[in-house]
Amino acid sequence: MNGFNSHYFFDADPARAELLKALKSEFPKKDIRVQVGDANPLIQELARGFNHNGTRGVAFLDPYGPHLDWRTVEALAATKKFEVIINFPLGMAINRLITRSGDIPDNWRRDLDKCFGTNDWKKLVYDDQPNLFGDIDRHKVDDAGSRLLGLYVDRLKGLFNHVATPSVVRNTRGIAIYYMIWAGPHGLGHKIADHILKQGEKIKAPKPNR
Ligand SMILES: C[S@@+](CC[C@H](N)C(=O)[O-])C[C@H]1O[C@@H](n2cnc3c(N)ncnc32)[C@H](O)[C@@H]1O
């Protein structure tokens, strides 16, 4: 098996990046590049320069929180040569930023807008009802998680020709912490992704929100 020609790793945490740098001595013959910093602009720059004929790439995007900027996903999709595997941290982070009361700190709101590349998430997750006193009572809907996953997958389908049905990853208490999502330009990759993701727990295909 040939493996990849080049490996690019990005991490904002210098200590974690040091661990990645150790891969260079473990695999001295491989082209391994490690950069410390916000992966978003670094990946976008890499994607913009990714125009060699016949070259293909796989991006594994594994954020803890809503830190994967939608523009990064757009930049990878625009190459038409990248497959992406996204660990979408819906239960462990994203859904938790969406408070029951609707009172969301501005910086969380901005992070969510950047992560989804739209503020459409807001109208999906709250049910606003007028009360007796002329005010609006805001409630978070019970199925906010599946609506948010639906929105994300739907938006990925706008960028990539193929998006596999996500596979859910649960913690030891059975709580869904993130979803593994594959998207790419080719049907063959889709077939392989479906085969692999089927090994995990598959969810019902999210309904489009449109
Ligand atoms: C879930 S961990 C990745 C784990 C890794 N994929 C593995 O299997 O060991 C998330 C990583 O993202 C890094 N991180 C968080 N925000 C980042 C950002 N904006 N740019 C680059 N790395 C970031 C954290 O330092 C952390 O190492």
Image: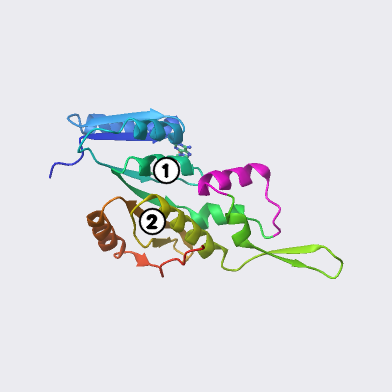
From the image, tell me which residue sits under label 1. Answer: 74
Image quarter where the N terminus lies is top left
Span shown in magenta: 101-118
Circle 1 SS class: helix
Instruction: Say above or below: 41 vs 167.
Output: above
Q: Is residue 8 magenta?
A: no
Secondary structure mainly formed by the magenta segment? helix
Q: Amino acid at mark 2?
A: Met
Task: Please state the horizontal and vertical placement of residue 103, each as a whole percent of the image.
Answer: 71, 53
The quarter of the image that holds ligand 1 is: top left
Label 1: few (<14), some (14–19) or many (≥20) C-alpha neighbours in 10 Å: some
Most extreme residue toward the right, as rendered? 133
Of 62 and 159, the residue lying toward us: 159
Instruction: Say above or below: 24 vs 159.
Output: above
Looking at the image, residue 144 sits to the left or right of residue 4; the answer is: right
Q: Is any atom of residue 135 visible in this view? A: yes
Task: Please state the horizontal and vertical placement of residue 55, each as a whole percent of the image.
Answer: 22, 37
Instruction: Say above or below: 29 vs 98.
Output: above
Residue found 39% across the figure and 35% down from its top: 43
Looking at the image, residue 184 sits to the left or right of residue 207; the answer is: left
Residue found 21% across the figure and 39% down from its top: 4
Circle 2 SS class: strand
Of 63 and 210, the residue lying toward us: 210
Colour setting: rainbow
Task: Please state the horizontal and vertical placement of residue 18, each as a whole percent of the image.
Answer: 37, 30
Task: Please state the horizontal and vertical placement of residue 182, each as a whole percent of the image.
Answer: 34, 54
| Residue 41 occupies quadrant | top left
Instruction: Say above or below: 119 vs 30.
Output: below
Q: Mark 1 or 2 closer to N-term?
A: 1
From the image, tell me which residue sits under label 2. Answer: 180
Q: Amino acid at mark 1?
A: Glu
Residue found 67% across the figure and 60% down from its top: 100
